[in-house]
Amino acid sequence: MLGITDPAIWFAYVLAIGLTLACILYGLLNWNIGLDDSHGS
């Protein structure tokens, strides 16, 4: 598939895409955390 025969290359691609999606999800879930200004900084 796609001319890539080495399983290690497929693992690297899958890992990179998975970590990218995990980082995006983490960013979306924690978008506004820590922006509370009610403590009078």
Image (tube, grey):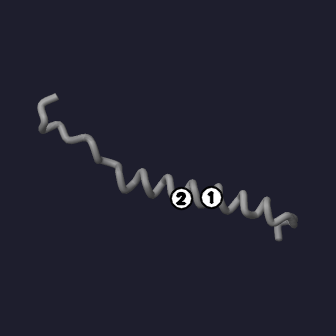
Report which residue position mark 2 lands on: 21
x, y percentage for residue 2?
A: 83, 66
Q: Quadrant of the C terminus?
A: top left
With 14 as the anchor, is 35 left or right in this view? left
With 3 as the anchor, is 24 left or right in this view? left
x, y percentage for residue 1?
A: 82, 71
**Label 2 residue SS:** helix
x, y percentage for residue 20?
A: 57, 54
Q: Residue furthest front?
A: 8
Name the foreground residue: 20 vs 6. 6
Q: Is residue 35 above or below residue 30?
A: above
With 26 as the anchor, is 17 left or right in this view? right
Mark 1 → mark 2, Cα distance in angstroms: 6 Å
Question: Disc 1 residue type?
Answer: Ile
Report which residue position mark 1 lands on: 17
x, y percentage for residue 10?
A: 76, 63
With 26 as the anchor, is 11 left or right in this view? right
Q: Residue furthest bottom?
A: 1
Q: Are marks 1 and 2 in contact (CB under 8 Å)?
A: yes
**Label 1 residue SS:** helix
Q: Is residue 7 above or below residue 25?
A: below
Mark 2: give few (<14), some (14-19) or many (20+) Cα within 10 Å: few
Return the mark for residue 9.
none
Which residue is found at the position 42% from the left and 51% from the top? 27
